[in-house]
Image (tube, grey):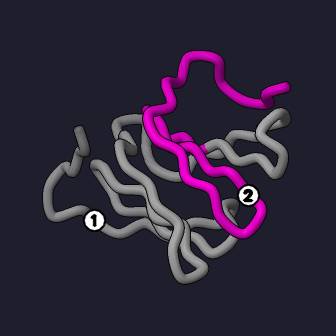
Amino acid sequence: SFTGSTNNFYRTAAYGNGRWVAGGTFGRVAYSTNGVNWAEIVVGTSTDSFNGSAYQNGQFVLVGSQIATSSDGVNWTLSASPESISFS
């Protein structure tokens, strides 16, 4: 099941510390502990997009038009990205 917007496109996902995190368009992030049931939160603005993700050393990192970091995948801190970052 999914709780959140249906018009978001998720572009990247990372797994760490028992949690999945997916970053997408419109500043949205989804998280799940089982990969089946997901909740969605707004981390950035409607113009933000997350294109890359990683989990390392107890931190999730989402990159794109902003850089977002989180230790739990739910509470995020935004930093300005020097330029839009994307991975191919």
Q: Where is residue 17 in the image (x, y as percent from the top left)?
A: 72, 69
The mark total stands at: 2
Residue flagged by tag 2: what amino acid is it?
Answer: Arg
Asked whether the viewer can see residue 33, the reply is yes
Please say if 75 is above or below 39. Answer: below
Residue displayed at 53% across by 66% down: 55
Q: Position of residue 79 (x, y in %)?
A: 35, 69
- Residue 11 to residue 86: above or below: above
Q: Magenta region: which residues?
A: 1-29
**Residue 26 visible in image:** no
Q: Would you identify the image quadrant in which residue 63 lies? A: bottom left
In terms of image quadrants, where is residue 45? Answer: top left
47, above or below 69, in the image: above
Give the residue number, with chain letter if any, for mark 2.
19
Inspect the image, locate mark 1, and give the three-letter code of the amino acid beneath it.
Answer: Ala
Residue at 84 percent across and 45 percent down: it is 34
Residue closest to the far bottom = 57
Residue at left offset 30%, top offset 49% = 64
**Mark 2–mark 1 distance (CA, rounded to whole Å):** 25 Å
Q: Which of 78 and 73 is in front in this view?
A: 73
The residue tagged with tag 2: helix, strand or loop? strand
Task: Examine the structure image and report whether residue 23 is included in the region drawn in magenta.
Answer: yes
Q: Is residue 14 left or right of residue 81?
A: right
The crowd level at tag 1 (other Cα within 10 Å; few <14, some 14-19, many 20+) is few
Quadrant position of the N terminus in the picture: top right
